[in-house]
Image: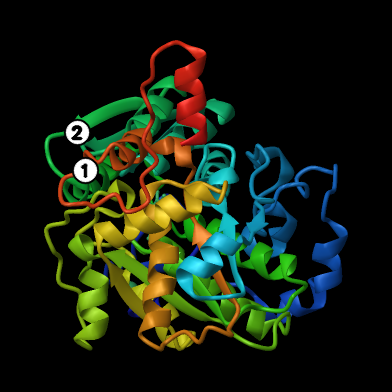
Amino acid sequence: MLRCIDCGGEFQPGAFYRCEKCSGLLDVVPDIEGLKEKVSRELFDSRLGSREFPYGSGIWRFRELIHPLVEDKNIVSRPEGNTNLYSHGKVSEYSGIKDIVLKHEGENPSGSFKDRGMSPGISEAKRLDMGTVACASTGNTSASMAAYASLAGIKSVVFIPEGMIAFGKLSQALAYGAKVLQIKGNFDRAMGLVQESSKELGMYLLNSINPWRIEGQKSIVFELIQQLGWNPPDWIVVPAGNLGNSSAFGKALRELKELGLIDKVPRIASVQAEGANPFYRMWKGEEDVLESVKPETIASAIKIGNPISWKKAMRAIKFSNGVVEEVSDQEIMDAKAIIDASGIGCEPASAASVAGAKKLLDAGVIDGKEKVACIITGNILKDPDATINYHLGKLEGIQPKFSNKPVVIDADLESVRKAVSG
Ligand SMILES: Cc1ncc(COP(=O)(O)O)c(C=O)c1O
Ligand SMILES: [Zn+2]
């Protein structure tokens, strides 16, 4: 069942994304009492490494908590999830947090966490027999949707802000076979347009306004806590753009707590880029309503001025006694350089998590003895331009503090000796 977060109106799932009475966002409502009988830590642990479809997936392992209505024949899975946790001395030293782990969602099939929501989203499109799916995207959603739609034999249409998405992502959407519409406007305009046109043209909308996307993204938290032996960290720090993940994390934690699968609720820290910080402003100013901004940041995946899920995300922050932080492009690119040089690697937006954790430690909000899990949302290969231009010192307004420039040398042994020993 779906329930409106504003008026409480209830609906059976279908091809709509807002409350038919008041236009509020919709939640999937789990049957907590029924689930208590069915799920346990032992059940989820028994499915780890399973070869039985669909339990090998890090989403569908938690099937009862993700999409209990969908039958095996409609599940589209690659399989996704099962992403690793990393810790590294360089990241600890840089952030000042000894026990900091990075969960690398860039290890998903299309290179970002979006696959977590897309698998149940496309499965629902199949269940509803939709012939075309659509999304607006800063890049990763379109890459993921295009891949899953092609896998399922469904047509896909993506709306992207012209000239504002990283090449790695655009190339994926084209290659996987989506119809790519480059909108002469920013992400927020593309988001408005896709909502209007999907209704008009009968396309199934797969942005995170779609509640099944949020259901799938809950599995990041389920899997993280399972990997930690069901001992939650003190903090989960997540980059924040359209606020789908922040919303999903709050819902996941509430459900785990209500089901008795965790004793303690970690605090969520949502981290925005300074130039695209409407949620931070709202939280800091203790406002009741989000005011949009004109977004500007090098982290194109979180370059969003009017995040759609702000109400759900605020609910998540309040439920988890969380915080919202902002970080500059300089802080993002420096944190990225440290994550990269640790051999882990990520795209710029992902590094907002580590940059935010460092800033929260410096401000005394996070204690250096606490356990902190940072979500790395996307793969390093998504945006090679940002990485190369940082190391070459070509990013306007950014000092490449940790740059690693290539060295041009003459083609002889002596030059090699000098360069290597130097
Ligand atoms: C790599 C990456 N990080 C972070 C985000 C922001 O996530 P959310 O919109 O759920 O806040 C996105 C969304 O596009 C992304 O692609
Ligand atoms: Zn409503």
Crowd tier of the residue under label 2, counting other residues whose Cα lies within 10 Å: few below 14, some 14–19, many 20 or above: few
State the image coordinates of residue 400 (x, y, percent, origin top left): 29, 49
Left or right, 200 with respect to 143, comes to left
Q: Is residue 199 above or below residue 97?
A: above
Location of mark 1 (residue): 395
Q: Is residue 199 above or below residue 322?
A: above
State the image coordinates of residue 418 (x, y, percent, origin top left): 46, 28
Q: Nearer the viewer, residue 360 or 291?
A: 360
Left or right, 265 with respect to 39, comes to left
Look at the image and tell me in which quarter the N terminus lies. Answer: bottom right
Location of mark 2 (residue): 163
The residue at 80%/64% (across/down) is: 44
- Where residue 318 sits, quadrant-wise, is bottom left
- Where residue 385 sits, quadrant-wise, is top left
Q: Nearer the viewer, residue 382 or 364?
A: 364
The residue at 67%/62% (across/down) is: 223
The residue at 53%/58% (across/down) is: 217
Disc 1/disc 2 C-alpha distance (Å): 17 Å
Disc on res. 108 = none
Judge depth for marks 1 and 2 and give the one in front.
1
* Beta carbon of the mark 1 residue lies under 8 A of ligand 1: no
Among numbered discs 1 and 2, the one appearing first in the sequence: 2
Contact flag, marks 1 and 2 (Cβ < 8 Å): no
Name the amino acid, label 1: Leu
Name the amino acid, label 2: Gly
State the image coordinates of residue 358 (x, y, percent, origin top left): 42, 73
State the image coordinates of residue 176 (x, y, percent, origin top left): 47, 24
- Where residue 51 sits, quadrant-wise, is top right
Q: How is the image coloured?
A: rainbow
Q: Nearer the viewer, residue 181 or 335?
A: 335
